[in-house]
Amino acid sequence: MIYAEIDTEEAEGSFLAHSIKSRSGRLGKGHRITASDIDDLLKSDITKVVSIQLEEGDIHEDQAAARLGKAITGNGLSPSEAFTGRCNIHSTVHGVLSVSPSEVDSLNNINEAITLATLAPYSVVYPGQLVATAKIIPLAAPVEALKSAEKTTRIVAHPFKVHKVGLILTRLPQTKDTVLEKTRSVVNQRLKNCENKLETTITVAHKSAEIAQAIKKLSSENHDLILIFGASAIVDRRDSLPKGLELAGGTIEHFGMPVDPGNLLLLGNHTKATVIGLPGCARSPKLNGFDWVLQR
């Protein structure tokens, strides 16, 4: 790419490095100069322009951005028309964004002319939301570098899947009905935020045997996601909720999570259902670790 200040009368076919105003209006950065543009510029007493000329192996910023945007756009996303070396990528679904930071880093290290910026992995996205931008920094990029970038990564937006969801609430003698109702309402709103809803709610005593029976009932009714909110937090694999899951014939996959709030979360399964023992913070509508598990 040749970048230089040249005589206006010799600029036909080159691209403006900077926007410029003439008597007839404004010519934008990257505009390809025509014979009529030259006539207009000269009549405006503009005798020199800063422009670029593409050399063999170069590709114009808009063409490069369009190619890169198309190459990295996976399911659930749509690339916009490229402009000023930029191709914006928008979500077409309500769901979760899948992007590999290491692959994005690799792409951004190929050549300084070629860049990609995205939302964080696992971000919740909505239809029409901007989730990524492919940007060519100068007015042209090397074709060979672009070819490498096109093969580096692909980002996807996964729409939320609809599940049949059951909720088990446990209570102690002192547990108030208002607390149970608030918990049910908050959990249901979380599900709605992920395009789901509560199908069934069962309230039982905070005893392993009763929890086990409730799990079996929901599983037999083909609930594929069973949430358990205990009257007291889970503190050990031998606590009431984990023990109830095992009594029902289920298995514990993992207990505890390196997220605060939300670290006392239990993950398991029963037949074909995923079972999640909720942390106490899930009683609040504020963001916590359970949201990230539920969204994914």
Image (cartoon, helix red, strand yellow):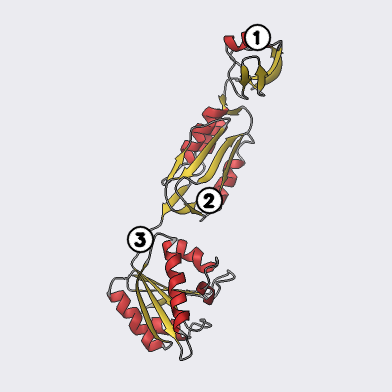
Amino acid type indicated by mark 1: Glu
Q: Secondary structure at mark 3?
A: loop
Residue matched to label 1: 10
Quick check: marks 1 and 3 in contact, CB under 8 Å? no
Q: Residue furthest left?
A: 221
Q: Is residue 245 left or right of residue 69?
A: left
Amino acid type indicated by mark 3: Val
Q: Position of residue 194 (x, y in %)?
A: 43, 60
- How far apart are the alpha carbons under marks 3 and 2? 25 Å
- How far apart are the alpha carbons under marks 1 and 2? 46 Å
Q: Position of residue 100 (x, y in %)?
A: 53, 51
Residue for point 46% across, 75% down: 183
Is 118 rendered above or below residue 282? Answer: above
Picture quadrant where residue 180 is located = bottom left
Residue matched to label 2: 100
In this rendering, which labeled residue sits more in front, label 3 or label 2? 3
Q: Which mark is residue 162?
A: 3
Question: Is residue 169 in view from this perspective?
Answer: yes
Q: Secondary structure at mark 2?
A: loop
Residue 29 or 114: which is nearer the viewer? 29
Residue for point 38% across, 82% down: 203
